[in-house]
Image (cartoon, coloured by chain):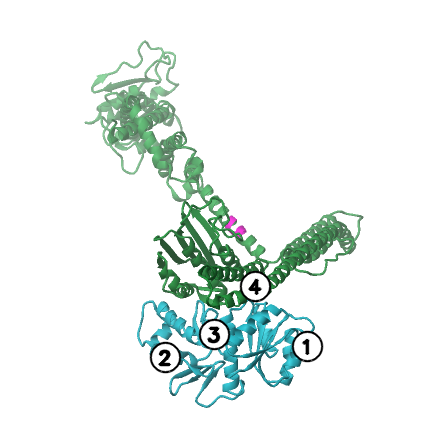
Amino acid sequence: MHETILVVDDDREIVGAIAILLEKEGYRVIRAYNGMEALDRVMDPAVQLLLIDVMMPRLDGLSAVMRIRDRRNLPIIVLSARSEETDKILGLSVGADDYVTKPFSPQELAARVRSQLRRYTRLGDVHGEARQDEIVNGRLVYRPGDLVLAADGEPVRLTATETRIVDLLMRNLGRIFPAEEIYRRVWEGECYAPENTVMVHIRRIREKIELNPRQPEYLKVVWGIGYKMEKKT
Amino acid sequence: MVTRWKKRLSLLALVLGVDLLLVGLAGAVFAGAVLLPGGYSPQDAFQAGYQNTALFRREIEDQLESALRLARSADKSSWYSMEEEGSNLLCQLMIRSASGAWQTVYSNTETALAGGSPVGYNFALTYDGGRVSIHKDGEALDIYGDGVYTPDSLWDVPGYSNRPAEEGDGDIRVYLAAIAQPVRVRGCYSSLYELQQGLTIARWFYLGECAVLGLALLLLLLAFLWRDARREARLALARRTGPVWFECKVLAVTAPPFLAPLFCLGFFARAFFSYAAALAVAATFCLAYPWLLYLAGCDLRHNEKPWRHSLCCALAGRVGRALRKLRAALSAAELALPLQRRFLRRGLVAAVCILLLSIAAWFLLYLLFYNVPFYYFNFWRQCFFSLLLATALVLLLLAPMVWLLRRGWDLLRQLGPFTARLSAVRSGDLAAPLELPADSDLRQAAEDLNGIHQGMRAALEERMKSERMKVELIANVSHDLKTPLTSVISYAELLREEEDLPEHVQDYIRILNDKAQRLSVMVQDVFEVSKAASGELSLHTERLDLGKLLRQTLADMDEAVSQSSLTFRTELPEAPVWITADGDRLYRVFQNLVQNVLEYSLEGSRVYVTLDAGKDAATVRLKNISRTELPPGVDFTARFVRGDQSRTDGGSGLGLAIASSFTAACGGALRVSTDADLFTVEVEFPLSR
């Protein structure tokens, strides 16, 4: 495929490491070391994804992202050492599609890049309209008709039980289900301590749909209450 | 052992003995005061016939004297006393007329007594020729003796040589005949009958008197012999009287001396009682009252402070308690009001009291002056001047009061803002300083308070600034650490993917990777702990079920738990335990605690996880046995403290610190206690309603 990715960071070694990592995955990498440079390079129509650091000299990452959003529609992943919730929200609100905190795991970064590119290339426009019979939730697309869940356009292989759980949660995005209710509706029976059973399945589904199963973005535990499928734009 | 009966009898003997003695003494007084002066001496009372008594002789002498006086007087129309005597004493009076013939002028019988007494009349007196002759039972009595009258003579009749008959008495003859056994005469008074009756009564009286006195002495002797038994009886009595209210006792002792005379002599006696009843009341009082005193004495002697058990004491106690309760309630109600309102009310009450007092004083003064005659003014002027003076005086007295009240009022008005200010300072509220007028009593205090506040604010700002700087510093440091760490992790990862490396180099790379990951975790943990400690942790609190959270956490960590050699014993209530906290942070808390347990527990030991929902708070307890000996006196929640100080593998040493600071940030409390090798962590949260 050879998609081209622009990697921007003032730390040359990090750029180098990311470049090696992505080139191994089969991408072409263009490097830039500050915001202004990034603005120049991003105009290359070959660039299909932008990986950009926040704290940079000359023009910081977020300002660059805002300007780039005015000119180009391409997936942007922000890299930052700031792990605060507020920083994440700020990054996403200025137009980034994803936010990865440093230090990142190389596999996770690769997975996120892959995910963004798939959504971008396969679905055309990331923010496009959903089809009638589809439930679209961020990276996930669920077709209730034929019980198929796709992550980044790739169908996810789920067992029958997992499918029922996904069916329940995807049909009720954002709603919190106690373990008892999930058990009752999926297994259609009563159970003395359903927490463990449900948790095991939730974990397995996460392994299949989350980019970083340890920090799930979609299938979340609401501690002390239940489980839910996070509603994403 | 003294029997019950003996006790009773000893008491009864004393009571009866004393009472009988009293009765006997009363009888003796009666005898001395009434019977003996009346002639009913014991000697006469026990004479065989009533005619042998001095009283009888006096009666006959009186009758004779009366008859002689009648005979001498001109008017002989009536002689009532003889008529009354009836058939008990027969009498005939004869006078010799000028012609020398004897003529009967009075007789109360058909029979001529000159010819001898009728049957049944054994006593016959004849007065003839100035001398008296008496025949009793047919025998003549020697009346005159040696013919000279002395006070010792039995009969006091005319005919003695030193008491001759009066001139002309030679023409009078009197015959008297007394019956042997006097009978009751219907319709009139018979002195002989009464005499005989009186003698009978006196006889019985004297007999009774002797009996009573004898019995009294006997009983008193018995009482004396049984004095030990009586002592116990007194104790028993005291026990009985103990529960009686002291007021009743006092009333019982003091009332009879006042009431008895009232009943006997006063209005009641005349209105409702006969004199016999009054006498009975008096007797009863005299006999019973000493025993009331005796009972009272027993009570006083054997009961400990009997006045303590009294209606007054009980009432006073009850009233006191009620008053105390009322006071407590009032003061509680008052304390519920804010300070200013409280003092305002007190001030109002004081003002109303002063007003009422001044009105009363004005009125009194008015009356006082009204009675002083200034001049001999007329009525209206008098009124006017009194009014003026009273008003002036009251106003004069009231002026300082009003001044005091005014000052108090101002103080109260400023006290409200002052206390509000105090609370504000305490809660760290950054309000404007309190400005009070220069003449205010609280001026100095307010200035001091402002000074304190300023000092506090400065200190607080300083602290907040330094805290902020600390967090900022740590944030910057962690950021600065993360950037090179990113390179380290990335290149270590690249190295790991490199093939064809010697075995030992691959080992090195693995170590590099592990340590780089741990460093990454540590940097993040340090950052979070310092944020939580400085209170800058962002929280999303919601109502959640602590039991469910624990179940979820354990389920989430099920893999690690089942891989360990530990056995988890959980005891979580089925019913939801609602608390308000940040679920994600709380998950971190318990995740860290369970990790801590997994890391430091003795292999194969049991771990107990319990949740107790109390009335106000829920407590989670994690108990495990430490693998290594626990150092005593260590605060395990302090940052970078681990049970085993020398341990270098695994854990940032921040697990408990994160758990503790996150718990505190969520409004709970985490406590660690150790008992030998038992390591207990308690996490307590207030229940949410």
Q: Mark 4 lies on which chain?
A: B
Label 3 Cα crowd, 10 Å radius (few <14 / some 14-19 / many 20+): many
**Labels 4 and 2 touching (C-beta < 8 A):** no
* Residue A136 among those drawn in magenta: no
Amino acid tagged 4? Leu
Tag 4, which secondary structure? helix
Q: Colour of chain A?
A: cyan
Of residues B347 and B591, the one drawn nearer to the viewer in this rendering: B591
Q: Mark 1 points at which residue?
A: A36
Of residues B637 and B3, the one drawn nearer to the viewer in this rendering: B637
Tag 1, which secondary structure? helix
Residue B218 located left or right of residue B300: left
Amino acid tagged 1? Met
Indicate whether B591 appears above or below A16.
above
Residue B581 located left or right of residue B249: right
Q: Give the residues in magenta.
A: B324-328
Of residues B434 and B532, the one drawn nearer to the viewer in this rendering: B532
Q: Which of marks 2 and 1 is nearer the N terminus?
A: 1
**Labels 2 and 3 touching (C-beta < 8 A):** no
Cα separation, mark 3 vs mark 1, equals 31 Å
Cα separation, mark 3 vs mark 4, equals 22 Å
Q: Which of marks 2 and 3 is nearer the N terminus?
A: 2
Residue B96 appears in the picture as rendered: no
Q: Mark 3 points at which residue?
A: A211
Cα separation, mark 2 vs mark 3, equals 21 Å
Circle 2 or circle 3, nearest the eye: 3
Q: Which numbered dot is residue A164?
A: 2
